[in-house]
């Protein structure tokens, strides 16, 4: 067999193998199907605004299989990136799914401004809740139900419940957010 015909034979065999491999993958026989992968049901990106800089971190991400993931809150970008994950109980996952699907939450505004004075830095939550019709995005600057109430601009009940739930889940997974135990959150989450 000449060098040219050998090369053509190998090339056609590689092409045939690649074709059959593509068909197997398309039919789902070549490995895990993408539909079986857990999807994000809630994501909160925290942005620390300081001296003209916006420093993002994954504050909370919850997947459809109940995995909750939190990363180090970054203030300077020099912090070590620590990721912690926990599996939510089925009851807690169902409670969260019910909350993010309530009409009250679906009707909140897209942005909530600062409710108290800041000196040089603040935090902003960029909350994303994927729905069948598209992702709902809510920005909340320095989530503070008490300050909003004192300013006679209270957050909607559904937003208070979501924000307090975010704090609670963050605390359960990462251990650094005890604010979910404030009076507003105790009332919203019915903690006694």
Image (tube, helix red, strand yellow):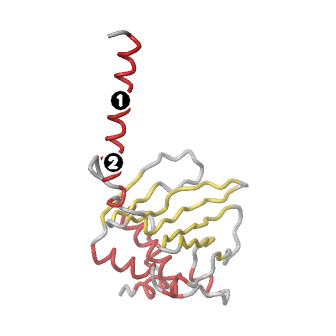
- Considering every residue shown, the one lying at the far top of the view is 2
Q: Is residue 61 above or below residue 139?
A: above
Number of marks in picture? 2
Indicate which disc residue 14 carries. 1
Q: Check disc 2 and report its element: helix, strand or loop.
A: helix
> What percent of the width, then of the height, locates residue 188?
45, 86
Comparing 28 with 186, the one in front is: 28
- Identified at 49% across, 62% down, the residue is 59
Q: Is residue 60 above or below residue 52?
A: below
Instruction: Classify mark 1: residues with Cα within 10 Å, few (<14), some (14-19) or many (20+).
Output: few
Indicate which disc residue 25 carries. 2
- Identified at 37% across, 63% down, the residue is 68
> What percent of the width, then of the height, locates residue 51?
72, 55
Q: Quadrant of the C terminus?
A: bottom left
Does 24 sit left or right of 187 as displayed? left
> What percent of the width, then of the height, locates residue 16?
34, 34
Does 128 sit left or right of 97 as displayed? right
Q: Is residue 78 above or below residue 127?
A: above
Where residue 78 sits, quadrant-wise, is top right
> What percent of the width, then of the height, locates residue 41?
43, 69
């Amino acid at each position: 067999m000449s060098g040219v015909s050998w090369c053509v034979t190998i090339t056609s065999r590689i092409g045939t193998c690649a074709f059959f491999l593509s068909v197997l993958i398309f039919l789902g026989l070549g490995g895990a199907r993408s539909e079986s992968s857990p999807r994000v049901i809630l994501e909160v990106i925290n942005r620390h605004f300081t001296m003209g800089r916006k420093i993002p971190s994954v504050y909370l991400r919850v997947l459809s299989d109940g995995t909750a993931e939190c990363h180090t809150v970054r203030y300077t970008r020099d912090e070590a990136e620590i990721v912690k994950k926990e599996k939510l109980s089925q009851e807690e996952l169902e409670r969260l799914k019910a909350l993010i699907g309530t009409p009250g939450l679906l009707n909140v505004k897209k942005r909530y401004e600062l409710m108290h004075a800041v000196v040089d830095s603040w935090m902003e939550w960029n909350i994303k809740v994927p729905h069948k019709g598209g992702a709902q995005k809510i920005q909340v600057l320095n989530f503070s139900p008490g300050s909003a109430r004192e300013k006679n601009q209270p957050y909607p009940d559904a937003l208070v419940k979501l924000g307090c739930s975010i704090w609670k889940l963050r605390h359960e997974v990462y251990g650094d957010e005890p604010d979910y135990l404030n009076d507003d959150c105790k009332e919203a989450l019915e903690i006694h």
